[in-house]
C-alpha cells in the first residue's frame, strides 16, 4: 500500500492510498500572531479606558480598538502599535475621549489584532453604560435662601454638593433624576454670603457650576 498526506497542523488531513506503504508529510504548527489574556472597557470621568494583556506575540503589527452603539456596526476608535514578538505578558491601554459625542446607553468595544501579513483576529466584546448629564442651570444667581438646580438628564441617581472656595463640602444632597428636565431645590439659608461651587456627580462623571450667595 502506498499513500501520501499533507497537513498544516500536525494532523493527517488527506490520504492517497495504493497497495504498499504510506508516505506522510507533516508540516510544523503555525503559531497564532497573538495570545490575548483579556480585554476590558471601563467608564471614567474623561472617557472610556480600554485595557488588554497579551501573553504571546508573533509577527503582530498593531491593534485597532473598535466602538459600536449597537454591537453590530463598529468603527475604529483608535490604533495602538504592538510590540510584535514577545513571549511574556504585556499590558496595553487606550483612552476613548469623545464623551460629548457618545449617545446615552450601552457602548460596545472590541479589539482587532492585526498581524504583519494583514490577517487579523478579534477579542471578546466589552461594554460600558454611559449616562451623561446633558445640561445644568443654576438659578437665581446670585441666590439668597434657595438655589434651583435644573438638570437635563437620563434617569439616574446623582449627588449634589455645595463647596466653599476652599473646596470643603458645606451641603450634600442626593436626588433621583427622571429622564428629561429635573429641578432640585437646595436650601441656602444657613450659608454665609460669598462665592460657592456646585458639583453634580453621577456614577462615573461630574459637572460643576458656580454661584453667589447674598
Image: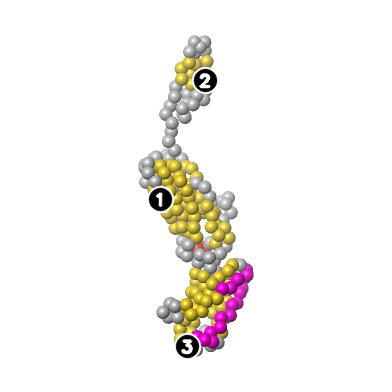
How many numbered markers are drawn? 3
- Pointer 1: what residue? 91
- The spot of residue 60 in percent (x, y) is 40, 42
Callout 3 secondary element: loop
Q: What's the residue at 53%, 68% (across, down)? A: 202
Q: Residue furthest top?
A: 20
Residue 76 in view of the camera: no
Q: Earlier in the sequence, mark 2 or mark 3?
A: 2
Residue at 40% across / 50% down in the picture?
A: 91
Q: State whether residue 161 appears in this view.
A: yes
Q: In this picture, is 189 found above or below 99?
A: below
Residue under label 2: 15
Mark seen at residue 193:
3
Q: Looking at the image, which is closer to me, 74 or 54?
A: 54
> Where in the figure is residue 38, as x and y percent of width and height?
47, 48
> Which label's residue is closer to the chain start, 1 or 2?
2
What colour scheme was applied to this rendering of the protein? secondary structure
> How packed is label 1: few (under 14 Cα within 10 Å), some, or many (20 or more)?
few
Residue 156 lies left or right of residue 46; in this view the side is: right
* Magenta residues, start to end: 174-192
Question: Cα distance, mark 2 to mark 3?
Answer: 92 Å
**Secondary structure mostly seen in the magenta stretch:** strand
Amino acid at each position: 500500500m502506498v499513500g501520501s498526506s499533507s497537513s498544516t497542523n500536525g494532523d493527517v488531513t488527506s490520504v492517497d492510498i495504493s497497495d504498499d506503504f504510506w508516505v506522510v508529510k507533516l508540516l510544523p504548527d503555525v503559531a497564532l500572531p497573538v495570545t490575548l489574556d483579556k480585554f476590558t472597557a471601563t467608564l471614567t470621568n474623561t472617557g472610556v479606558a480600554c485595557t488588554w494583556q497579551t501573553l504571546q506575540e508573533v509577527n503582530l503589527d498593531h491593534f485597532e480598538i473598535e466602538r459600536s452603539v449597537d454591537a453590530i456596526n463598529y468603527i475604529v476608535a483608535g490604533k495602538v502599535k504592538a510590540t510584535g514578538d514577545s513571549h511574556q505578558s504585556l499590558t496595553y491601554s487606550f483612552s476613548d475621549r469623545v464623551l460629548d459625542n457618545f449617545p446615552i446607553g450601552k457602548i460596545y468595544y472590541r479589539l482587532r489584532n492585526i498581524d504583519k501579513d494583514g490577517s487579523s483576529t478579534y477579542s471578546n466584546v466589552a461594554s460600558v453604560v454611559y449616562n451623561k448629564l446633558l445640561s445644568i442651570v443654576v438659578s437665581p444667581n446670585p441666590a439668597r435662601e434657595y438655589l434651583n438646580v435644573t438638570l437635563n438628564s437620563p434617569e439616574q441617581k446623582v449627588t449634589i454638593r455645595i463647596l466653599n472656595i476652599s473646596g470643603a463640602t458645606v451641603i450634600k444632597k442626593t436626588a433621583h433624576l427622571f429622564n428629561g428636565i429635573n429641578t432640585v431645590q437646595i436650601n441656602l439659608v444657613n450659608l454665609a454670603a460669598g462665592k460657592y461651587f456646585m458639583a453634580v456627580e453621577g456614577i462615573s462623571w461630574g459637572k460643576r457650576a458656580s454661584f453667589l450667595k447674598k
